[in-house]
Image (cartoon, grey):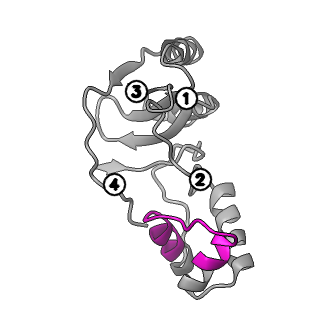
């Protein structure tokens, strides 16, 4: 079983933060895109039958509660001259929350999730320069005392990944 554990969810607990039906609708709807325009939040809110302020407040709440780790555009770091890699750690369950906080403190860590596997913490590292990947991995290893499994991309496939809330 794989469960997305947003970057900002340092609890490491396997319990999902509570989502009501409106939150679920927002999370599910915004994974498919975000309009470009003068009032994109208003445009999205209208499509969901919400007020613009309500949508913005709900998004803030989802971020503050750690349900969402970030809300913003995704960039192709490598096409912009940066580095990108998938990394993993094997973390004791009892220490998962503490290690998640250390890993997530790095601004280069785009997201972090828990898996039921020997390597149970997986995260993406995106850097401004390809050479910075090694620096971030070395820092995480020094801070956590754990060896980082670096799984750099060999080939890219677009599968339209979505997480149903």
Tell me the CA gap for discs 2 and 3. Answer: 22 Å
Write the start and end of the magenta stretch as one range. 24-44
Tell me the CA gap for discs 1 and 2. Answer: 25 Å
User: What residue does disc 3 label?
Assistant: 87
Tell me the CA gap for discs 3 and 4. Answer: 18 Å
Tell me the CA gap for discs 3 and 1. Answer: 14 Å
Viewer-proximal residue among 136 and 10: 136
Viewer-proximal residue among 36 and 149: 36
User: Please, what secondary structure does the residue beneath circle 1 have?
Assistant: helix
Residue 15 pos. (x, y %): 48, 56
Q: Is residue 117 left or right of residue 57?
A: left
- Frontmost of labels 1 and 2 is 2
The disc, 1 or 4, on the residue closer to the chain's N-terminal end is 1
**Residue 80 to residue 137: above or below:** below
The disc, 2 or 3, on the residue closer to the chain's N-terminal end is 2
User: What residue does disc 2 label?
Assistant: 72
Few, some or many residues within 10 Å of mark 1 (<14, 14–19, 20+):
many
Viewer-proximal residue among 31 and 91: 31
Tell me the CA gap for discs 4 and 2. Answer: 16 Å
């Amino acid at each position: 079983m794989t469960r997305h554990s947003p970057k900002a969810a340092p609890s490491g607990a396997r319990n999902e933060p509570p989502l009501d039906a409106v939150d679920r609708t927002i999370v599910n709807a915004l994974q498919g895109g975000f309009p470009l325009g003068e009032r994109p939040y208003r445009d999205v809110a209208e499509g969901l039958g919400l007020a613009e302020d309500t949508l913005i407040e709900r998004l803030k709440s989802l971020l503050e509660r750690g349900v969402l780790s970030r809300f913003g555009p995704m960039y192709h770091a490598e096409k912009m001259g940066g580095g990108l890699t998938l990394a993993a750690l094997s973390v004791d369950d009892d220490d998962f929350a503490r290690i998640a906080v250390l890993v997530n403190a790095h601004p280069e860590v785009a997201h972090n999730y828990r898996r039921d596997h020997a390597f149970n913490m997986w995260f993406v590292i995106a850097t401004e320069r390809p050479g910075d990947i090694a620096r971030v991995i070395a820092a995480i290893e020094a801070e956590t005392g754990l060896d980082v499994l670096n799984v750099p991309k060999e080939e890219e496939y677009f599968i339209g990944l979505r997480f149903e809330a």
